[in-house]
Amino acid sequence: MSESPHATPVVDATTHAAVAELLATVERRWRDLDLAALESLWDTTRAPFYIAEEAGEIHTSFEAIRAYWAFTRSIIEKMDLRLGRAELVSLGPDLLTAVYSLHWECLIKGQKAPVGGDNRACAVLRRIEGSWRFTQYIEAPLAPIVYIRQLYEQSVRPGFGTAAEIRSGNTG
């Protein structure tokens, strides 16, 4: 992530480590398809806010999120999720924003081949009794034109040259 021109409150190493452990738990629960256990990672004392890339609706109750997780669990045979290192911004005592990348892969029941993709997420986390919990979660997929351009870039054979090499005449 690029540096923001605005000063942001410093988040200490202990908080970074605690959030990294929270995200590692999220990865394990998705990999194990133990989606019902994800709720224990949330602040359940307040109404949630959850936007998944593939869901058309915004989930603003735990009842809606549980239904989303149950449906998702019912159609996935295998899942893998890898979350990038979170960039953290303190919003005040015991409240912060976490922004991170994610890569998912899954096999959906009845499909011939697994699918996967890259995404970004933004979460608001609250510290409750020493543990960080989700209060809001939003996935922010790449715009289709950006995603397609990246796919085309991946299709260039090794040795073709980079843009800088081609423009300088240093290609073979």
Image (cartoon, grey):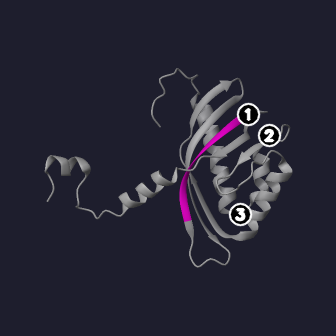
Q: Residues within 10 Å of mark 3 (few under 14, many from 20)?
A: many
Q: Secondary structure at mark 2?
A: loop
Q: Which mark is residue 43?
A: 2
Q: Quadrant of the C terminus?
A: bottom left
Q: Residue at x 74, y 37 (%)?
A: 131
Q: Earlier in the sequence, mark 1 or mark 2?
A: 2
Q: Residues within 10 Å of mark 2 (few under 14, many from 20)?
A: some
Judge whether 10 appears above or below 25 on screen.
above
Judge whether 24 appears above or below 44 on screen.
below
Q: Please tell me whether residue 119 belongs to the stretch shown in magenta.
A: yes
- Residue annotated with mark 3: 33
The percent coordinates of residue 15 (x first, y second) are 63, 33
The percent coordinates of residue 93 (x first, y second) are 71, 23
Q: Nearer the viewer, residue 131 or 47?
A: 47
* Amino acid type, residue under disc 3 in the picture: Leu
Q: Give the left or right position of residue 138, taking residue 155 as reference.
A: right
Q: Earlier in the sequence, mark 3 or mark 2?
A: 3
The percent coordinates of residue 115 (x first, y second) are 56, 67
User: Mainly helix, strand or loop, the magenta region?
Assistant: strand
Cβ atoms under marks 1 and 2 closer than 8 Å: yes
* Amino acid type, residue under disc 1 in the picture: Arg
Q: Please tell me whether residue 145 belongs to the stretch shown in magenta.
A: no
Q: Quadrant of residue 92?
A: top right
Q: Residue at x 51, y 21 (%)?
A: 6
The percent coordinates of residue 156 (x first, y second) are 31, 62
The magenta segment? 116-125
Cβ atoms under marks 3 and 1 closer than 8 Å: no
